[in-house]
């Protein structure tokens, strides 16, 4: 199986890294490093040269021994030297090279003295005070490492997905404009739409990787270059201190590389096993049958080659998606285009920043059929929560507005506080005049699991309540969810004809993906709501949809994909 130059270069780079940590002869290290650069930048396919009977010694600086190794790699064979190095030094050890003060020599010493072969083990050894005592490392370097781990990649909280999206969009478009770049996509957890990302992983297809690499390394936002080779590099951006890993591959390998770097690790390992079971080989460079390269320019070709339906990135967590793809039981995931309206938003009557009319206009411009205005109730004094009188005024305002709006309906609603005893913060006499009541917990996060669960059940006992807002109360990186028996809450919601919300605020994403999946199992529909406080917040809907997709949900599982008439029927309580 012919291997692309880029892939050959990547393997040679890894050999150089590992040899260097292993304290091999510096000339040998340099030879591999130079060979990686040469092959990576060579304009013609090495595999094709070999097929045409040309000799690789023609490449500058490549001697007979390296030429043989490159030829082996080009034919898809694994090199005994790389296998041996990988067996000796775990893959994660190269990550240590990215830390300040750590070159191959010190990484070697730390490995020899303390068995450190990953950032996690380094962190533990630093905490135990062992690192400063290693000869050739010392106090100063240990202090520098502690500081770096505290603020740097390891300890740093994971970046919210929405922040990562904002950072990656201009970077991708810069790469797409670089010469020779045919395709560029973000992979990793960002593409799987996890709620937070550890780092960004980019995959680029370009026959000549040089220009893309240059564009990447010289990108304005780059604060520090951690690692650079001919086809891969890692940098830290000023924005959010986010690390970005780039891989440049050939077009023929693009699908395989995108699949590999999208992960999850568990998903691709499972796929690789599936390939082996069929006598095929799948890796980050392609899909192979013996010496023959099967189509792998796109992920779709690879899934097809494995007799699987295409698996959307959001499902690639090794949680049953491969089995479902094989048996034709993959869900047809809800998409942003299925969303008909938004059922949780605020206006400047409470803590929103726009008027009711402005919010309605923005929703109509998005093509929505309906929205529900759900300002806060009186208990939220700091947000100027509405009492019964002000809510009555808002209901009148909604009626007036509806008379002027064509093609979109504003539903009158409230986000009413669920008090600690489970009572609602406004009298039934006013709640009964609303189209939709969202009930939320904003206080009393410290109750026991039993108390919190009873509180929510009691709130749902009120037949005027429709949807529980942000049901776990967590704030990503800031506040843990309160203790609650979610399965019991969901079962009770089904019995009572209530619903739960997927709040799309990037720091909430509440419910999260696993709870979405649980809801589906229990037959509970969910609302996906932005909790918008300004017109621009309507765009957050995609983050709620992303989590619902990660939870295997289809359009029919979502309340606000239903047309208005059906929505009204669904809101009628049992
Ligand atoms: P993150 O960055 O912590 O949010 O999570 P990911 O999934 O983006 O993980 P990351 O950045 O370490 O690696 C990106 C993808 O590359 C990962 O999802 C799968 C692939 N990958 C990286 N290293 C390995 C590996 O050693 N084996 C396999 N099978 N895949 C790997
Ligand atoms: Ca990542
Ligand atoms: Ca990464
Ligand atoms: Zn709220």
Image (cartoon, rainbow, N blue to C red):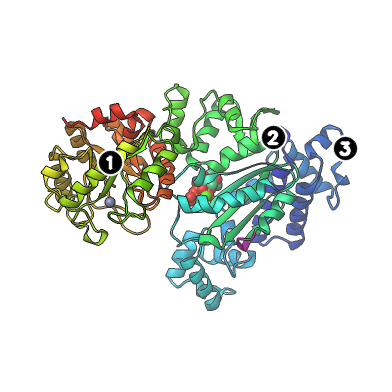
Q: Badge 2 local density, few (<14 within 10 Å), some, or many (20+)? A: many
- Residue labelled with disc 1: 400
List x then y, in percent, for residue 150. Answer: 46, 67
List x then y, in percent, for residue 97. Answer: 60, 62
Q: Badge 1 local density, few (<14 within 10 Å), some, or many (20+)? A: few
- Secondary structure at numbered mark 3: loop
Cα gap from disc 2 to disc 1, whole angstroms: 60 Å
On the picture, is 319 further left or further right than 220? left
- Nearer the observer: mark 2 or 1; the answer is 1
Q: Residue at x 36, y 49 (%)?
A: 532
Which residue is nearer to you in this view: 379 or 250? 379
- Residue labelled with disc 2: 252
Q: Residue at x 41, y 48 (%)?
A: 535
Work out whether residue 535 can be spotted: yes
Cα gap from disc 2 to disc 3, whole angstroms: 22 Å
Tag of residue 54: 3
Q: Is 223 one of the magenta-colored residues?
A: yes
Res 365 quadrant in image: top left
Magenta stretch, main secondary structure class? strand
- Secondary structure at numbered mark 2: helix
Whether the residue carrying mark 2 lies under 8 Å from ligand 1 is answered with no
First to last magenta residue range: 220-225
Cα gap from disc 3 to disc 1, whole angstroms: 81 Å
Whether the residue carrying mark 1 lies under 8 Å from ligand 4 is answered with no
Q: Residue at x 61, y 56 (%)?
A: 234
């Amino acid at each position: 199986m012919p291997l692309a130059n880029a892939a050959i270069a990547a393997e040679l780079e890894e050999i150089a890294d590992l040899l260097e940590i292993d304290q091999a002869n510096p000339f040998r290290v340099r030879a591999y490093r130079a060979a990686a650069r040469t092959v990576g930048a060579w304009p013609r396919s090495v595999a094709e040269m070999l097929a045409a009977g040309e000799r690789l010694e023609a490449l500058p600086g490549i001697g007979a021994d390296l030429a043989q190794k490159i030829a082996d790699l080009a034919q898809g064979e694994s090199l005994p030297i790389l296998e041996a190095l990988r067996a000796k030094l775990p893959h994660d050890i190269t990550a240590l090279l990215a830390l300040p003060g750590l070159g191959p020599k010190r990484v070697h010493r730390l490995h020899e003295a303390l068995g450190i072969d990953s950032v996690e083990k380094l962190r533990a050894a630093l905490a135990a005070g062992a690192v400063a005592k290693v000869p050739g490392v010392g106090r100063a370097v240990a202090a520098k490492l502690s500081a770096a781990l505290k603020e740097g990649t390891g300890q740093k909280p994971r970046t919210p997905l929405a922040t990562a999206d904002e950072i990656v969009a201009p970077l991708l478009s810069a790469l797409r404009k670089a010469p020779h770049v045919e395709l560029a996509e973000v992979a990793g957890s960002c593409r799987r739409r996890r709620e937070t990302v550890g780092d960004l992983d980019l995959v680029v297809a370009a026959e000549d990787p040089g220009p893309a690499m240059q564009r990447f390394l010289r990108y304005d936002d780059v604060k520090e270059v951690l690692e650079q080779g001919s086809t891969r590099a890692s940098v830290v951006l000023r924005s959010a201190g986010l690390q970005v890993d780039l891989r440049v591959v050939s077009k023929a390998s693009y699908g395989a590389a995108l699949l590999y770097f999208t992960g999850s690790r568990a998903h691709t390992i499972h796929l690789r096993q599936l390939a082996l079971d069929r006598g095929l080989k799948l890796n980050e460079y392609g899909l192979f049958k013996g010496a023959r390269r099967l189509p792998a320019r796109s992920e779709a070709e690879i899934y097809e080659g494995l007799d699987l339906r295409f698996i959307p990135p959001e499902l690639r967590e090794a949680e049953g998606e491969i089995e479902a793809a094989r048996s034709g039981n993959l869900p047809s995931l809800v998409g942003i285009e299925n969303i008909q309206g938004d059922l949780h938003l605020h206006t400047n009557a409470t803590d929103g920043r726009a008027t009711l009319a402005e919010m309605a206009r923005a929703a109509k411009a998005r093509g929505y059929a309906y929205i529900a205005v759900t300002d806060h109730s009186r208990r939220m004094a700091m947000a100027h929560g509405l009492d019964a009188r002000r809510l009555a005024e808002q209901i009148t305002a909604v009626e007036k507005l509806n008379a002027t709006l064509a093609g979109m309906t504003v539903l009158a609603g409230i986000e009413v506080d669920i008090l600690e005893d489970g009572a609602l913060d406004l009298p039934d006499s006013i709640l009964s005049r609303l189209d939709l009541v969202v009930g939320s917990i904003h206080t009393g996060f410290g109750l026991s699991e039993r108390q919190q669960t009873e509180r929510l059940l009691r709130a749902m006992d009120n037949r005027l309540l429709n949807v529980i807002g942000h049901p776990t109360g967590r704030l990503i990186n800031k506040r843990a969810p309160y203790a609650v028996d979610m399965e019991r809450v969901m079962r009770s919601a089904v019995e009572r004809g209530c619903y739960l919300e997927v709040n799309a605020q990037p720091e909430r994403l509440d419910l999260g993906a696993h709870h979405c999946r649980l809801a589906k199992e229990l037959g509970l529909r969910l609302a996906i709501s932005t909790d918008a406080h300004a017109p621009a917040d309507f765009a957050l809907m995609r983050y709620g949809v992303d989590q619902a997709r990660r939870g295997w949900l289809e359009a029919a599982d979502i309340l606000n994909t239903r047309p208005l008439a059906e929505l009204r029927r669904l809101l009628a309580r049992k």
